[in-house]
Structures are given as structure tokens and as C-alpha cells.
Amino acid sequence: MDLAFCTEDGELWDARMLSDEAKKQPREWLENLRQTFVCGGCEQKARFIDSTKRIPHFGIVQGNKHDDDCDFLGDPSGFNNGAGAPLPDRAPAEGNKEVRYAKPGPLTPPAAGGAGGNKAGRRNGGDQAAGNGPLHETTALRTLLKNLRNRNNYPPENLWLDVPARGPAVRATEYFHKLSEVTRETITDGVTRAFWGQISSAQENGGDKGQKTLWINCDSRGEIVTIRVPFAVKDELFESMGVKNPHELIDAHVIVEGVLSQARKHSVTVTDAAKIAFLPKR
């Protein structure tokens, strides 16, 4: 693949540009970065490959493979058939991927690894041609969140999503809304959207007999907008994620599909554990 995200400097690097920059820097500059690259779509660990016989590129570390709905699966540039571009046999007006929901798993899952296998690309020890994965008709909220946090230009203008709560052909730029950009003047129009951001604070309060509501904030103390998770959903989330204390969520990224409402301040209420997803802090 041509692109990979660097967790050290927060940049999405083009392999050829990285190769050119490395020639201008001391040798240790690139060596210090080699262990910090991940796929920009599914965040599997990536390695930079630059030799005199091959065009500079990135590959997934041997033993791992791209997630099935990874944005970078397919064309090595990563923009042909994942969450970031329309499927090749569909016009934009017909929609693109359908958003898929699932209850979150562990907040910090065990590191992927193994000895390759026949589902990995040839560069990863498998028997599939690298960069030619199958097309998938759905994409998970969590995968979309990975793209949002890793790519400054995401979503592209030509991306449309099928959102079950809204119907087919929803323009992605109208579906995603960054929580830190919600203001007191933001209109609450009753439309389902995906709100996302990096968690700055999380706490429990209210409720009787210990049945406290979880409040997740991405704008410091939630003075303008907050994510409200009622006790029943919070309990289900904490169990599935292996979380015991809301402070464990701080600095993680979150995405929640719902409707923005307004009373004293804006809020999005989570009524289904499958409509919220998290990525652990780096």
C-alpha cells in the first residue's frame, strides 16, 4: 500500500514521500519511525519497505492481515473499495457501504499476531495477491472511526453511506459530525448522525441504588455537548469492554450514532450498545 499512518508524528505518510524525506535526514530518523507505522484504515501494524529493486511502499507486518472492511484493502493506494470510496459497480446516488453495528469488544484487545496463513497477502506470508481483497458491502462504525482519526481529509466528498436509520445514499460529509465542533448555535434537527471525537473526561452520576448514568465528554467538561449513556447500556458496555472505571475511557476515541438534542446543553443519548464504538488511546 502507498499510505500508512505514523503514530509518532500523527502524519499519514505516502511511501515515496517518506523515502525522499529519509534521504534528507540522518539515518536514525527513519529507524526511529519504522516501528510506529500502522495501516490508516484498520490500524494493523505496518512496515516500510524501501529498496533499490522495488518502489517504496508499506506492507502489513507478517502474521497480520487487514480487517475485512479496511479502507486500504484492495488497490495499494487504499482508496478503491473500502469505507473511503464508492464500490466500483455503484453510482453515488445508489449509496455505498451500509453501516454495520456491533456491541464493542475489549477496549484494549490483545495484539494481533501469528504465522501468516492463507488469508493474508503474499507479502504477509499468505497466498492471496497483496492488495486484492474481496469487496465488502458493509463497514463497521469502528472502522469508520479509525479513518476519521487517522485521515485529515476524511470523509471524501464522493463518499455516500447507507445508514439504516436514514435510508440509502447519505452523504458522509453530512453524516459525520466532530463533537469538538458542536457549538451552542448548532441546530438540533432530529436527524441521525455519527458524532465522534477524543474523550477528554468521563464520569458517572445521578440515579438511585447505584444505577448511575455515564457522561462522556469530548469538549473538556461537556459544557456544550455530552454523550449520555443510561445505566443499563453503560453496564452492558463496561462488561463487554472489560472497563471498570470511566476514567479508563479518557483519551480514547469514540463514535456514537444518534440524534443531537438540546436542553441546557447539547447531548446524544445512547440507547443501543451497538451504536457506539471506541478506539483505545495510542
Image (cartoon, helix red, strand yellow):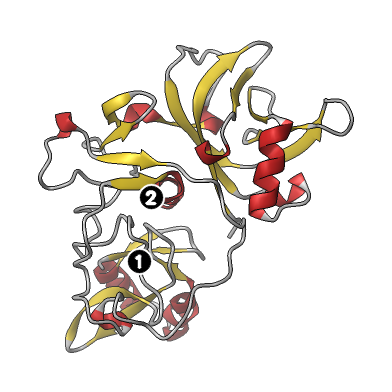
Q: Quadrant of residue 126?
A: bottom left
Q: Which residue is mark 2?
A: 151
Indicate which disc residue 36 carries.
Answer: none
191 in relation to 71, above or below: above
Q: Position of residue 158 (x, y in %)?
A: 21, 37
C-alpha distance separating marks 1 and 2:
17 Å
Answer with left or right where residue 180 lies relative to residue 98. right
**Residue 215 visible in the current orientation:** no
262 in relation to 140, above or below: above
Which residue type carries mark 1? His
Q: Quadrant of the C terminus?
A: bottom right
First in sequence: mark 1 vs mark 2: 1
Q: Quadrant of the N terminus?
A: bottom left
**Residue 153 visible in the current orientation:** yes
Q: Nearer the viewer, mark 1 or mark 2?
A: 1
Q: Quadrant of residue 191?
A: top left
Residue at x 36% of width, y 30% of height: 164
Residue at x 43% of width, y 53% of height: 150
Residue 97 vs residue 266, the one in the foreground: 97
Q: Position of residue 140 (x, y in %)?
A: 40, 47
Which residue type carries mark 2? Arg
Give the mark count. 2
Other-residue count near label 2 (Cα within 10 Å), few / some / many at <14 / 14–19 / ≥20: some
Answer with left or right where residue 26 lies relative to residue 160. right
Q: Position of residue 266 (x, y in %)?
A: 61, 19
Q: Quadrant of residue 48?
A: bottom left
169 in relation to 5, above or below: above
Other-residue count near label 1 (Cα within 10 Å), few / some / many at <14 / 14–19 / ≥20: many
187 in relation to 73, above or below: above
Indicate the secondary structure of the residue bearing disc 2: loop
Answer with left or right where residue 251 lies relative to residue 11. right
Q: Which residue is mark 1?
A: 66
